[in-house]
Amino acid sequence: IDILLVEDNEADIKITLRAFGKAKIKNNISIVRDGQESLSYMFRQNEYADRPQFSYPDMIVLDISLPKLTGFEVLEALKKDDKLKVIPVVMLTSSKDDEDIIRSYRDGAVSFIQKPVDYQEFEKTVDGFNLYWHTLNKLPKLK
């Protein structure tokens, strides 16, 4: 699966990449570090205008707390676009707020995953994530 990881915290990026790297199923992961950059990537603007080099991801893993635009603002913009709204967005965040969970699903996220504090738990989460998205679920392919 080609995943766009939208995360601004370098430590969280490293932990996420390490957990995905150790997983039994491998993914191709591209990284953007703020909400505006994620929309530039998805809408093929600015440095991401070269469509062949930057293909659409199969899935977006999106943090809520981001610079420039929040994860909620990014989610809202993606779900308003007729082409991009079919791409599954998974919220991956440290938030424990019930309102964030409700808003994520209401605005079109397909999953809400809380970042575990314990790294071994996070590895188990990634393995479960991979099992579901690679084996059980079918993803749309955008061109």
Image (tube, grey):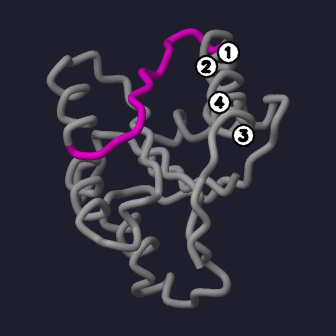
Separation (CA) of disc 2 from disc 4: 11 Å
Q: Residue 83, image x and y in percent?
A: 40, 73
Q: Relative to 47, does residue 126 appear above or below in the rendering?
A: above
Circles 2 and 4, Cβ within 8 Å, touching? The answer is: no
Residue 80 falls left or right of residue 37: left
Q: Which residues are magenta?
A: 107-119
The residue under label 2 is: 125
Magenta-colored stretch includes residue 48: no
Separation (CA) of disc 4 from disc 1: 12 Å
Q: Residue 123, image x and y in percent?
A: 68, 19
Tell which tag, 4 or 1, sits nearer the viewer: 4
Q: Earlier in the sequence, mark 2 or mark 4?
A: 2
Residue 106 sits in quarter:
top left
Separation (CA) of disc 3 from disc 4: 6 Å
Q: What secondary structure is found at the residue carrying circle 4?
A: helix
Q: Relative to 20, does residue 35 appear above or below in the rendering?
A: below
Residue 55 falls left or right of residue 27: left
Q: Residue 80, image x and y in percent?
A: 23, 66
The residue under label 1 is: 124
Instruction: Return the mark for residue 132.
Output: 4
Residue type of the residue flagged with mark 3:
His
